[in-house]
Image: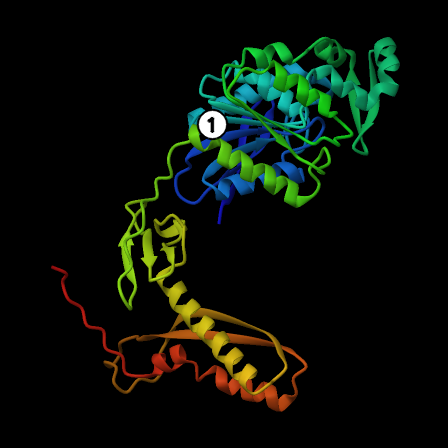
């Protein structure tokens, strides 16, 4: 499973900015930088869902709260579009110094406009993605249009954005005035993927048209069909992430995971991948999966541990045996759930053990949940059958392991 790590760095105005780095299992094929929408945060559903989905595909994503937003320090009233761009450049610098320079910039709404502008100041960027981005920064002023006159005359005003109060100063209006992104995207000199919904009620589809027409090839467009501006529906966020992952494939390093070994007849073959200390392919006739150890003991955490597979085999066999019996006897079992926990326990009384020597045995704690309109007799019979599964019986049978050196 991808991992999320808390990160902190200094923003353009000198404040500590809070960030999260979503990391894939193993070494990332590329690092991406995600800029959230105006007055949003790094934890908005669209940002978190897209970041996690990309991490699952091998692309690490840094998402952060702009100055004065979310968990970041600073005063939002002192920020503007220019400071957002500068924060992005600072975030890219942090990635480069601590991990790897970002190859991909992804921006949502005003964040999309910001990544277009910031790309010119981040040499490592190889591709840019916008999601529901405006063609000019001034578009964001529509969200507080009723307060513009007050801001112009009083120098500032408190406005409601997303149900929360924010102070907007005149310097913000001055900064976004006339800031069109069409010229910036024309000279982007990087591939761009423009993602936009034709029914976006916050940033109209005409903005996507302007950006796409102004952009030079290579350029691509993704229509988000029935999605709203914030990608509130989880399936829309996942769709964007899946397309971005496929589109960005050529701008990321190849997947370092080597091909699995060829299966052997009637058995399982395990082979080291060469990545990390313990990562191995586990292959049978139909499946190829990974075995590994947790990061705490030097692994990559990319697969179940050897004992995890043993526990999984016991649990799966138990579940399947109960199901086969219930179906054969017409028992109304809706669903069976089996959990197995493995640990080592000291043997208090062992006749064959050396005197005074502490001995441990393997203990597999198995818990079974049976769902359905079952009576007490049926439950008791199914629990009895549970311990008759082939793997369970193997644990209690005499087992021989013959080892030989391959030639």
Q: Would you identify the image quadrant in which residue 72 lies?
A: top right
Image quadrant in which the C terminus is located: bottom left
Query: Is 92 situated left or right of 225 in this image?
Result: left
Vertical side of 305 occupied by 257: above or below:
above
Image height of 390 relative to 104, above or below: below
Q: Position of residue 90 (x, y in %)?
A: 53, 21
Q: Toward the viewer: 15 or 335?
A: 335
Q: Residue at x 72, y 8 (%)?
A: 178
What is the x, y in percent for residue 146? 88, 20
Mark 1 residue element:
helix
At x 54%, y 10%, the residue is: 187
Residue at the image point whose x is 39% and y is 64% from the top: 309
Where is 183 relative to 405, above or below?
above
Residue 84 is at least partly visible in this image: no
The answer to whether one can see residue 150 in this image is yes
- Check the image and name the residue furthest to the left: 407
Q: Is residue 40 left or right of residue 48?
A: right
**On the image, which quarter does residue 28 sit in?**
top left
Residue ID for mark 1: 95
Q: Position of residue 104 (x, y in %)?
A: 50, 27
So how many labels did they put on this image?
1
Relative depth, front residue between 249 and 38: 249
Q: Residue at x 60, y 18 (%)?
A: 85
Q: Position of residue 235 (x, y in %)?
A: 64, 45
């Amino acid at each position: 499973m991808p991992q999320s790590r808390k990160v902190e760095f200094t923003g353009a105005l000198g404040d500590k900015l809070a960030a999260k780095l979503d990391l894939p299992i193993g070494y990332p094929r590329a690092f991406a930088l995600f800029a959230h929408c105006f007055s949003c945060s790094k934890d908005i559903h669209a940002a978190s869902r897209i970041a996690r989905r990309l991490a699952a595909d091998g692309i690490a994503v840094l998402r952060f709260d702009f100055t004065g937003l979310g968990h970041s320090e600073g005063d939002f009233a002192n920020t503007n579009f220019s400071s957002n761009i500068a924060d992005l450049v600072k975030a890219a610098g942090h990635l480069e110094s601590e991990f790897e320079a970002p190859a991909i910039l992804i921006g949502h709404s005003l964040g999309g406009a910001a990544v277009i502008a910031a790309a010119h100041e981040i040499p490592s960027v190889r591709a840019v993605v916008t999601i529901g981005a405006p063609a000019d920064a001034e578009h964001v002023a529509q969200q507080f249009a009723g307060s513009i006159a007050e801001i112009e005359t009083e120098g500032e005003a408190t406005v409601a954005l997303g149900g929360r109060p924010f102070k907007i100063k005149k310097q913000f209006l001055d900064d976004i005035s006339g800031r069109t992104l069409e010229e910036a995207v024309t000279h982007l000199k990087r591939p761009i993927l423009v993602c936009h919904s034709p029914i976006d009620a916050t940033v109209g589809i005409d903005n996507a048209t302007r950006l796409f027409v102004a952009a030079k090839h290579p350029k691509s467009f993704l229509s988000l069909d029935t999605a709203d501006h914030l990608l509130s529906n989880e399936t829309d966020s996942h769709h964007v992430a899946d397309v971005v992952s496929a589109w960005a494939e050529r701008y990321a390093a190849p997947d370092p995971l080597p091909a699995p070994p060829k299966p052997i007849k009637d058995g399982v073959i395990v082979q080291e991948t060469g990545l990390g200390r313990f990562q191995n392919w586990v292959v049978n006739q139909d499946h190829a999966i990974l075995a590994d150890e947790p990061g705490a003991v030097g692994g990559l955490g990319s697969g179940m541990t050897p004992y995890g597979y043993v526990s999984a085999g016991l649990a799966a066999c138990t579940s399947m045996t109960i199901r086969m019996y219930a179906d054969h006897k017409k028992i109304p079992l809706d669903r069976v759930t089996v959990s197995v926990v493995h640990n080592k326990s000291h043997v208090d009384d062992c006749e064959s053990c050396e005197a005074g020597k502490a001995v441990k045995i393997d203990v597999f704690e198995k818990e079974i949940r049976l769902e359905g309109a079952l009576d007490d007799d049926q439950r008791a019979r199914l629990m009895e059958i549970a311990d008759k599964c082939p793997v369970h019986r193997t644990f209690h049978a005499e087992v021989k392991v013959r080892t030989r050196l391959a030639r």
